[in-house]
């Protein structure tokens, strides 16, 4: 499943260590930009930096071809979060973002992801 800001949803995102994405982004990050949180589907990745959200769409059989999409926090019109329910067998939480250009993105996080932390982080960068 491709992660980009032109399609609606990405599911089953699991948090991964920041070290596993820094090499991928070295050529994209600007001065003073730092990775804050990173998530992964089977192959694709979603990275929150202190400046923007970057999706990495791994393509092809070998996975050597990658497509990068970037959306700065300044373009977020609004967002909403949904927390995981109490004692769910498969806890998941969701993040929905509407950008000023009309693009939307919806992300479903699996496991013990602190969706409140993601909401606070986005609020700090947007407000």
Image (cartoon, grey):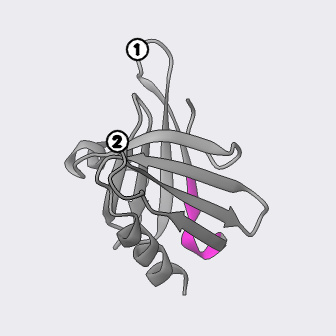
**Residue 32 drawn at (x, y percent):** 34, 73
**Residue 110 drawn at (x, y percent):** 38, 45
The N terminus lies in which quarter of the figure? top right
Q: Residue at x 73, y 56 (%)?
A: 103
Q: Is residue 49 above or below residue 24?
A: below
Question: Which badge, 2 or 1, is on the more N-terminal residue?
Answer: 1
Query: Which is more foreground, mark 2 or mark 1?
Result: 2
Examine the structure image and report whether residue 72 is included in the region drawn in magenta. yes
**In the image, farthest residue toward the right:** 102
In the image, 103: left or right of 94?
right
Q: Which residue is mark 1?
A: 62
Residue 10 occupies which quadrant of the picture?
top right
Q: Residue at x 41, y 35 (%)?
A: 41
**SS at circle 2:** loop
Q: Residues within 10 Å of mark 2 (few under 14, many from 20)?
A: few
In the image, 6: left or right of 127?
right
Q: Which residues are magenta?
A: 70-75
Q: Which residue is mark 2?
A: 89
């Amino acid at each position: 499943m491709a992660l980009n800001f032109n399609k609606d949803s990405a599911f089953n995102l699991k948090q991964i260590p920041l070290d596993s994405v820094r090499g991928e982004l070295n050529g994209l990050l600007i001065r003073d930009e730092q990775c804050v949180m990173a998530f992964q589907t089977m192959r694709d990745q979603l990275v929150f930096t202190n400046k923007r959200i970057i999706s990495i769409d791994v393509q092809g059989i070998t996975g050597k071809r990658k497509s990068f999409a970037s959306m700065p926090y300044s373009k977020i019109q609004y967002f909403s979060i949904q927390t995981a329910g109490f004692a769910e067998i498969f806890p998941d939480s969701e993040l929905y973002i509407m950008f000023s250009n009309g693009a939307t993105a919806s992300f479903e996080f699996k496991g013990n992801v602190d969706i409140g932390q993601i909401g606070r982080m986005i609020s700090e960068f947007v407000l």
